[in-house]
Amino acid sequence: MTEGRNVTVIPVNDHVWLLDDNREATCYVVAGSVRAAVIDTSLGLADICKTARSLTSLPLMCINTHGHEDHIGGNWAFEKAYMNLEDLPLAKEWIADPGVRDWLEKTGASYPPFEHVEDRQTFDLGGVLLEAFHLPGHTAGEIVLLDRRDRILFSGDGILQHLWLQLEESLPVKTQIASMERLLPLRDTFDTILHGHCQSPCGAELFDTLLAALKDLAAGNTAEDVDHEWLGNVSKAHPYQPEDRRIVYKPQAE
Ligand SMILES: [Zn+2]
């Protein structure tokens, strides 16, 4: 854990908080009347659990939207963590990384067991129900969580302005489209999208513009596409509007 790492807490309403960890990843705390959920835990450099405890005295449960390290990193502070186990290989690979193992040895911390999240599984926080929906695309085990009471969709890295489908573990564009189309009957149940890398809440129009852009990409309208550099690699990106949004994808698969 890095002392003094900057976690910015932004209230979304009186029982939902956005935790922006150094602009690298975003987690959420959702409090019901009997328990609170911590959705994603960032890289593990900041103690997200401690920040959550400063917001609510309710028992905490940890739910991961997927198995990438910038979401499961802080799971070490919990006794159990929920995740769709299709992402277990990703989580295991990261936990086995020599740097992570070193850190765990030095600090005495350990990662908790992961418990599978079924499609349509619900988490009753007391007055607030989180409904999980499987959304394979960015990773095979990506899930989104719907909070109908607050009309919020917590979307991890599954629905966001800059969607990454270029990773080795990512699924084809058509799979992402099918995943999002399966959610269309729920589209009028949320007004706000809180994803894994935002510094403020997004409007639900993000869902519509992203899905339209994915269909445009799948239709082969790639004349305006650009090279996109990421972590020393270059992939293609399909820009879309409004603002500077893009879908990064595997060119060979399109
Ligand atoms: Zn991710």
Image (cartoon, rainbow, N blue to C red):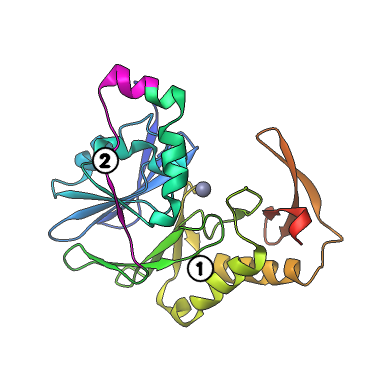
Asked if residue 172 is positioned above or below residue 115 in the image, the reply reads below
Measuring 59% from the left and 54% from the top, which residue is drawn there? 170
Q: Residues within 10 Å of mark 2 (few under 14, many from 20)?
A: some
Front position among marks 1 and 2: 2
Assess whether mark 2 and mark 1 are in contact (beta carbons under 8 angstroms). no
Q: Position of residue 82 (x, y in %)?
A: 30, 53
Q: Quadrant of residue 13?
A: bottom left
Quadrant of the drawing holding the N terminus: top left
- In the current view of this chain or complex, which residue is farthest to the bottom? 185
Measuring 65% from the left and 69% from the top, which residue is drawn there? 174
Marks 1 and 2, how far apart in space?
33 Å
Instruction: Please tell me the numbered disc located at residue 204.
Output: 1
Instruction: Please tell me the numbered disc located at residue 112.
Output: 2
Q: Secondary structure at mark 1?
A: loop
Would residue 55 appear left or right of 151 to someone viewing this image? left
Nearer to us in this view, 20 or 144:
144
Q: Position of residue 104 (x, y in %)?
A: 32, 24
Would residue 51 appear left or right of 244 to someone viewing this image? left
Q: Position of residue 21 (x, y in %)?
A: 42, 37
The amino acid sitting under disc 1 is Ala
Marked residue nearer the N-terminal end (1 or 2): 2
Q: Quadrant of residue 247?
A: bottom right
Q: Quadrant of residue 149?
A: bottom left
Q: Which residues are magenta?
A: 102-118
Nearer to us in this view, 94 or 190:
94
